[in-house]
Amino acid sequence: MKIKIFYFARLKETLKFSTEDLELPDDAFASTLTILKLKAHLAKRSDVWQQMLMGKLKVRGAINHALVDDNALISDGDEVAFFPPVTGG
Amino acid sequence: MAVSVQTEDFDAGLEISRLRNARKDTGAVVSFIGLVRDLNEGDQVSQLTLEHYPGMTEKALEAIVSQAQNRWAIFDAVVIHRVGTLQATEQIVLVAVSSAHRREAFKACEFIMDYLKTEAPFWKKERMQSGERWLDAKNSDDEARERWNQ
């Protein structure tokens, strides 16, 4: 499966990533991929990723421009985004 | 409904006039303008930068206004939110709502702001003399939104 991931605000700045295309083998992991499982997968990249995605910072996820919770399922072709709680207004 | 995410400033008076003149049975227009302050958490702030998620932001704002329209008998609503770098005293956000009577417009305007603060993908970064910092979300904003579900 192929997905696109966007990072915003503190995540983008600290991870030095604003967007990436991620390709995963079409196995059982991909077919049951949730926001939480994707976070844990990406967190294996380094200590910084671990700290930003699975650490103390609250990270919100969106799929195809809609806010979702950690258990939301990700499908092939989805646009996923990770960001800190919002602070507009 | 009109929703805009933009770098340029807006004319709140013009937006209010548009709502006022759109229909003759408009009895109330309530508006809120959010501004950049030069002081936050005891520190002098020289400028504020707003980042957003293009593509999602407009959809999120439209969804919030739709919820307000479903909840109260309002005629129309305008939401303008600026992004990019802003200085103290500059306008950040405008929410203006028209209705036949004041109560609906007051409630819808506050509802839209409370949801915007907790669900629309904007992030603020402050620049101070000592450096820069991302603002943290406030629990009080979540609580303000939750009031509408009670």
Image (cartoon, coloured by chain):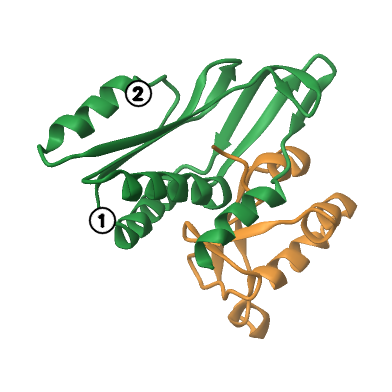
Chain colours: A orange, B green
Label 1 sits on what residue type? Ala
Q: Residue B87: x, y in percent? A: 59, 15
Name the one closer to the observer, A13 or B51: B51
Label 2 sits on what residue type? Ala
Q: Residue A11: x, y in percent? A: 72, 45
Within-10-Å neighbours for mark 2: few <14, some 14–19, many 20+: some
Write down the residue under mark 1: B73
* Residue at 35% over, 23% down: B12
Write down the residue under mark 2: B12
Q: CA distance from mark 1 to mark 2?
A: 22 Å
Q: Secondary structure at mark 1?
A: loop
In this picture, residue B89 sits left or right of residue B54: right
Q: Secondary structure at mark 2?
A: helix
Q: Is residue B1 visible?
A: no
Q: Is residue A33 visible?
A: yes
Q: Quadrant location of residue B20?
A: top left
